[in-house]
Structure formats: structure tokens, C-alpha cells
Image (cartoon, grey):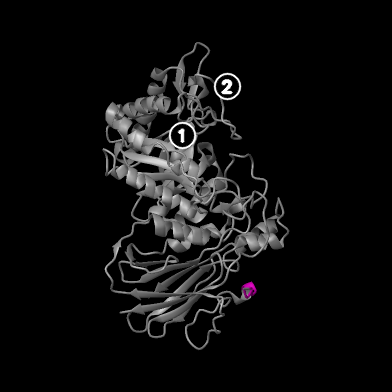
């Protein structure tokens, strides 16, 4: 049914939240959910696996001021501890050079500036070891079609690659100390089952690269953590672990990737239709079970890339769709993975070239010009969840408890994207309002609810951008307006009536409720 729209001046009153006589009669077509919560129920550990690590474009971008401001904003909102990016060995970082006599030398000047900048902001590197320095490549002309054209070939001489890894690790330890660097992760390459790896056959040649890299790192110091195979589409994990065992090569974690629009054929080799809302966690579950059945059933699992889409779909990654999608992903994946790295924290990003419009379907939580997207607000809200998970009977709810006893509920109304192409489709999300009747037992007398929202009328810079006509190059005044429109809306404070509360959520809306 049509949604009631209000102006920003009525923030917090756009949807009635109170339970009882003051809310309007529920329309016959409404989606009604009853959620019973026991405030004293036994909980299970609920680590915040979804917000401990983020991806970003390529290494040299970490030298930019806007990158650093974005990483500070996301760190303040989530407290995340690791960042992963491509290209620490790419030409624009300048690590490897070969003189006119063919001698190789290393220059770690930009490496130091990149990692110093992260550590100064409380972020540790999740080091993706790649791509191939052209000076070491078996084919310097073989490049990926990213705008910055990284080289994707195996080394011409593995002794030179081993020497680079050895020198790189020694330099890091000399600069930062072994206790610090031992807390990092070192991941060998990126998506060797796609066009990022030019070795043939792909798997066997990648294993050669992995073996050399892992052994070179451990030769410097056995405390350094190394893993792979960093595959796309949740691939190769059983084969990789078998290889690790058979070759007696070190591995401290398994990493792989998946996106919401990966196909069942690519990931599961089946013809089924797996919705975008479920693909990521279906894949996490698959790899979780593969590790459990492997020779290393306790091997940590890291999904070092994931998102709702691997393409630039402006109705997906730019919009309020991401709030329910993210909350549902947390609900489904919890307990099956150690870390998940959302790709990416910022649209300071150049894989397809220089950004030409702030809302083009970029992967980041923050659009160009430091404009927070609805996804940024969703992560900010979900950061408030507790570290104990309580039972919940609904697939549209997460119920958690903090150490101080505060109950924190995430509630959502998932609806498909308005559009599913690289061209933006203007329009309201389809579906009906979801009415969630929350009934909490054993809650302290006088408890109040603090209610946070992200939806079409709360914390949504895209609505303001649409009203401007979606300019490719907003003026400075428009940028200021978009930043303001994108801020997380101020919360509402409500009293409960005998532990009960009604929450009305529009399609693609996410609500977070703190019960104090």
C-alpha cells in the first residue's frame, strides 16, 4: 500500500511506533509479525564478524586524503580493525625496480606511508599479496582490464618472487615489530579462478605460487599468518585444504569470496534460483561445511570479499535496500565464519575508472565527496547490537543483549531492489508495511525504547540526490546538502506498555531498538 511520506522536519514521526490505541487500525493487506522476547533468556556468543574488516580499492588510494577521511568515518561508526586492498606490489606503489644491468632493488617508501597511515588510524592491514610486479612477470604485457591494469601473470623466476616476499616481510617486521605484524593476515593473491590469474592450469599454478609465498613468509618468521586461496564464488576450498595437507605447506586460515548476484551454477553447480538475499550465506554455509569435513576442521574461515552485488547496480548498493539485506546476512551467517570483509568501505575506488557520478552503484559505504550512503547508516546501527544473541522466532529480526543487560533488536522489512541494472530506476520499494508487535517479558519496570531507522525517509541521501536531478558533478552547496541528508536520523525515545511495543517498517526499512 502507499507509504505515508513526511518532510524532514517531522523526523522520527514518519511512522507511528507506539503500541495501543494511538496507532491506526492495521490494513487487511499488512504484514503482521509477533515477536516475543524473554529478556532473561540464555544467549549464545555473537561476535561482530561482519564489521571487523572492510575492503577497499587498491593500495595507492590509501595515500589520498579522502580515502583517509572515509576510513576514519567508518572506523568511528563500526570500530573495524582490518582493511584489505589489491595491488601492494603494483607499479604505482613502486616496490620493485630493475636497473639497466638487470639487478633488482626494492623501495618500500610508499608501502611505509600506506601502512603507517592505517596504523595511525587504528586499522591493521589484511595484506593481499599481489599483483605481479611487471619487473618480475613472466609476461609483462598480460594485464587485467581494470582501469589501472595490474599484471596477473606468474613470476618469470620463482627465486625472484621468493626474494621479494622475504624482503617485504623482513622490512615490515623491522619497521613495526614482530608482535604487530604477527597480528596481521597475509593472503596469497586475489581470485585466481578468474581473470586475475594468468597461470595455466589455474589451480595447479596457483598452488605453486601459494607454496612459494607461504614458505617464504614462514621462513622469515613462523608467527606470520598466511592463507588462501582467495577465490571468487566460494570455490576450491576442499581442493586447497587437500593440497595444503599433501604438500605439507603452511596455512593459518582459508579465504574466499561471494556476492549476492553470483549464480547457483557458479557457486553450487546447480540450476536452482537462489535469491540475492540468501546467496552470500548459502555460500558461507557451504564452505563452513567443507572445512568441517576437511583434514583441518577448525581452520578459520574468512570471506575476504562479499556484498549484495559484484556489479555497479545503483538501486542495490546505493540505496536503503542494503539495510535489510545486511541485517538478514548477519542473521543467516552468524556462527559459521570468523570474519567477513564488506567490499568496500569507500567509493574512493577506481577499478572502472575515475568516479563520474556520486551514486553510480559503487560498492562503498560512503559515496564520492564523503557522502554517507544508507549502507553506512545500516552499519552504524547494527554496530549497536549486543554480543549475546537471544532466540527470535522471526526471520526479520535479530535479538541481542549487551553485557550491561540492554536488549538490542534489529528489525527489518526486506523487499527486492527497485531496479536491477546499471541504470538507476526511480521509484518506491514495492511491498506493504510490516507491523512488528514486540512483547518482552522480564523487562525491568520503566524500561524505555530508543528507536533508530534507515529507510526512504530516514538517513537516505539518495532521495535528496534524486530531488536534485542526479547531477554528475554536484556543486559544493549540493554536496553539503547531500552530506546532511545522508546523516543517520536522530532516534526516537518511546515508553513501553507492559513490555509491549509496535514497530511499523516500510519496505526496505531497517529499525534498531534499544531497550534500556
Q: Nearer the viewer, residue 242 or 46?
A: 242
From the viewer's perspective, is residue 448 above or below residue 287?
Answer: below
> Magenta stretch containing residue 290, yes or no?
no
Q: Residue at x 38, y 50 (%)?
A: 285
Q: Nearer the viewer, residue 67 or 109?
A: 67
Q: Earlier in the sequence, mark 2 or mark 1?
A: 1
From the viewer's perspective, is residue 261 above or below residue 108?
Answer: below
Residue 362 percent across, percent down from the top left: 59, 49
Residue at the front extreme of this rendering: 271
Tag 2's secondary structure? loop
Q: Looking at the rendering, which quadrant does residue 355 occupy?
A: top right
Of circles 2 and 1, the one toward us is: 2
Residue 101 percent across, percent down from the top left: 50, 10
Q: Which residue is mark 1?
A: 111
Tag 1's secondary structure? helix
> Magenta stretch containing residue 3, yes or no?
yes
Q: Looking at the rendering, which quadrant does residue 415 occupy?
A: bottom right
Any part of residue 379 in sight = yes
Query: Dot 2: few (<14), some (14–19), or many (≥20) neighbours within 10 Å?
Result: few
Q: Residue at x 29, y 45 (%)?
A: 292
Using the numbered discs, state the Cα–Cα distance from disc 2 to disc 1 in whole angstroms. 24 Å
| Highlighted range, magenta | 2-8
Any part of residue 73 in sight = no
Query: Dot 1: few (<14), some (14–19), or many (≥20) neighbours within 10 Å?
Result: many
Residue 92 percent across, percent down from the top left: 55, 31
Q: Which residue is mark 2?
A: 141
Residue 175 percent across, percent down from the top left: 37, 34
Q: Residue at x 30, y 36 (%)?
A: 178
Amino acid at each position: 500500500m502507499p507509504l505515508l511520506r513526511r518532510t524532514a522536519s517531522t523526523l522520527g514521526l514518519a511512522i507511528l511506533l507506539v503500541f495501543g490505541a494511538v496507532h491506526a487500525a492495521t490494513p487487511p493487506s499488512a504484514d503482521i509479525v509477533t515477536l516475543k522476547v524473554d529478556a532473561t533468556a540464555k544467549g549464545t556468543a555473537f561476535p561482530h564478524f561482519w564489521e571487523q574488516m572492510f575492503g577497499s580499492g587498491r593500495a595507492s588510494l590509501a595515500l589520498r586524503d579522502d580515502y583517509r577521511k572515509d576510513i576514519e568515518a567508518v572506523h568511528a561508526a563500526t570500530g573495524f580493525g582490518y582493511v584489505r586492498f589489491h595491488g601492494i606490489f603494483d607499479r604505482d606503489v613502486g616496490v620493485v625496480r630493475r636497473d639497466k644491468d638487470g639487478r633488482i632493488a626494492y623501495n618500500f617508501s610508499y608501502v611505509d606511508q600506506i601502512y603507517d597511515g592505517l596504523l595511525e588510524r587504528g586499522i591493521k592491514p589484511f595484506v593481499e599479496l599481489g599483483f605481479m610486479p611487471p619487473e618480475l612477470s613472466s609476461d609483462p604485457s598480460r594485464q587485467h582490464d581494470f582501469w589501472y591494469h595490474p599484471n596477473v601473470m606468474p613470476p618469470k623466476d620463482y627465486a625472484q618472487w621468493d626474494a621479494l616476499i622475504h624482503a617485504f616481510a623482513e622490512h615490515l617486521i623491522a619497521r613495526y615489530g614482530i608482535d604487530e605484524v604477527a597480528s596481521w593476515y597475509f593472503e596469497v593473491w586475489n581470485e585466481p579462478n578468474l581473470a586475475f590469474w594468468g597461470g595455466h592450469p589455474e589451480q595447479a599454478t596457483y598452488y605453486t605460487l601459494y607454496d612459494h609465498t607461504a614458505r617464504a613468509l614462514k621462513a622469515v618468521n613462523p608467527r606470520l599468518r598466511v592463507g588462501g586461496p582467495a577465490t571468487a564464488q566460494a570455490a576450491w576450498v576442499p581442493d586447497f585444504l587437500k593440497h595444503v595437507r599433501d604438500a605439507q605447506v603452511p596455512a593459518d586460515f582459508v579465504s574466499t569470496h561471494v556476492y549476492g548476484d553470483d549464480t547457483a551454477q557458479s557457486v553450487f553447480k546447480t540450476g536452482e534460483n537462489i535469491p540475492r538475499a540468501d546467496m552470500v550465506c548459502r555460500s558461507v554455509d557451504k564452505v563452513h561445511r567443507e572445512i568441517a569435513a576437511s583434514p583441518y576442521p577448525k581452520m578459520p574461515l574468512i570471506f575476504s570479499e562479499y556484498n549484495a552485488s559484484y556489479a555497479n547496480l545503483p538501486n542495490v548498493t546505493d540505496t536503503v535496500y542494503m539495510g535489510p539485506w545486511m541485517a538478514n546476512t548477519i542473521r543467516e551467517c552468524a556462527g559459521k565464519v570468523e570474519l567477513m570483509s564488506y567490499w568496500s568501505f569507500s567509493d574512493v575506488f577506481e577499478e572502472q575508472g575515475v568516479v563520474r557520478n556520486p551514486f553510480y552503484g559503487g560498492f562503498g559505504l560512503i559515496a564520492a565527496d564523503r557522502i554517507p550512503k544508507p549502507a553506512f547508516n545500516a552499519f552504524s546501527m547494527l554496530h549497536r547490537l549486543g554480543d549475546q544473541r537471544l532466540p527470535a522466532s522471526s526471520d526479520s529480526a535479530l535479538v541481542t543483549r549487551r553485557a550491561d543487560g540492554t536488549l538490542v533488536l534489529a528489525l527489518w522489512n526486506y523487499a527486492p531492489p527497485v531496479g536491477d541494472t546499471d541504470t538507476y530506476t526511480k521509484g518506491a520499494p514495492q511491498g506493504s508495511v510490516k507491523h512488528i508487535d514486540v512483547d518482552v517479558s522480564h523487562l525491568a519496570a520503566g524500561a524505555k525504547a530508543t528507536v533508530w531507522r534507515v529507510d526512504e525517509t530516514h538517513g537516505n541521501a539518495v532521495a535528496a540526490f534524486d530531488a536534485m536531478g542526479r547531477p554528475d558533478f554536484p556543486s559544493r552547496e549540493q554536496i553539503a546538502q547531500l552530506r546532511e541528508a545522508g546523516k543517520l536520523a536522530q532516534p526516537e525515545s518511546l515508553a513501553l506498555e507492559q513490555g509491549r511495543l509496535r514497530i511499523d517498517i516500510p519496505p526496505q526499512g531497517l529499525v534498531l531498538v534499544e531497550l534500556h
